[in-house]
Image (cartoon, rainbow, N blue to C red):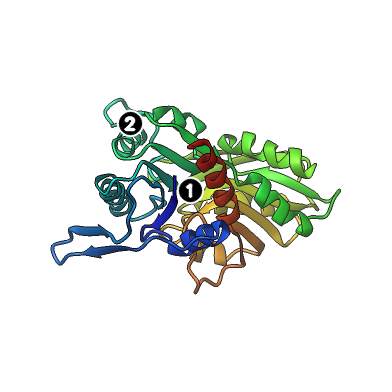
Amino acid sequence: MKLTVFSGRANPPLAESVASSLGLRLGQRIIETFPDDELYVRIDEDVKGHNVYLIQPTNPPVADHLLELLLLSDACRRAGAERITAVTPYFGYARQERRVKGSEPVAARLMADLMGTRVDRVIAVDLHNPAVEGFFSVPVENLSAVPLLAGAIRPHLIQGQTVLVAPDLGAVKLVQRYADILNLPVAYIHKVRGGTGDVSVRSVIGDVKGRRVLIVDDMISTGCTMVSAIEAVMAEGCEPGILVAAVHALMAGDAAESLARLPLDRILVTDSLRIDAGTTLPLEVAGLGPMLADAIKRLHGKDF
């Protein structure tokens, strides 16, 4: 079964990296937005009987990128593709995995249901909540970029003087995974989030005074959680030159501006989302292309 890789418009540079790591060129397709805001998609490749992989994170604008993915997959299906896998390193709506007040939809489940109508499998990277995998009616490969990020940040650590910090209780398990790889002590921050999205830090649990700090989370969205965490460890007397590591760099709203005002030495992220080339943040990007390509090779081999 021939392997073919297409890219949506969400993150073409990542798709190029994946294709290059596979020794392939990206499949030809046309995607346009009509004046009435409707999307037009056309596959300009023969995919009959092919094993197709669609590289398309569902990042903002989430609705557009999700619909684009569904249209691409439908086009491939109607053109005779044998199997279709959605490679969505960032899965939008993953944080809406439960009802809080009882009157909301479970949006993550709905998005999973929609994707399951048009693809045979999904490849994701560090889902915000691993339980989201159970929402899909098709197999999910939830890869982790933690080993990649931990390896990239290791040269910047000072053993015996660096402490890992979880910005909230929800990131404690994630921080422990970094700690197991890097052999570093752990601290965490107890916070309370207000109804408007504001974050109030209550206390830092653990010793960060006089030590270099590495704050890790699965994503940086609006930056409120990360900014409050940085301010909290600074107030506790940590060493200057704070390190940050996050898998997904959403940088929504004023996140970049808020982080740029703080004394950060380095922000390590992946390219699961397209990175703004004009950013003034001290970003270091760990590429997911080879990791995703390895997963595709492994799964493609199982399809024979």
Q: Mark 1 or mark 2: which is in front?
A: 1
The crowding category of the residue bearing disc 1, from other C-alpha atoms within 10 Å (few below 14, some 14 to 19, many at least 20), is many
Q: Which mark is residue 106?
A: 2
Task: Give percent across and percent down for residue 201.
Answer: 57, 43
Q: Which part of the image, by quadrant, shows the N terminus?
A: top left
User: For the residue labelled by badge 1, is the local secondary structure a helix, a strand or a loop?
Assistant: loop
Q: Position of residue 38 (x, y in %)?
A: 17, 58
Q: Are marks 1 and 2 in contact (CB under 8 Å)?
A: no
Up-down relation of residue 102 to residue 261 (above or below): above
Residue 294, compared with residue 275, is above or below; it is above
Which residue is pictured at 70% across the width and 49% down the height? 150
Residue 26 has which mark? none
Disc 2 packing (10 Å; few <14; some 14–19; many ≥20): some
Amino acid tagged 2:
Val
Q: Position of residue 197 (x, y in %)?
A: 42, 46
- Image quarter of residue 266: bottom right
Across and down, in percent, residue 76 comes to 30, 49
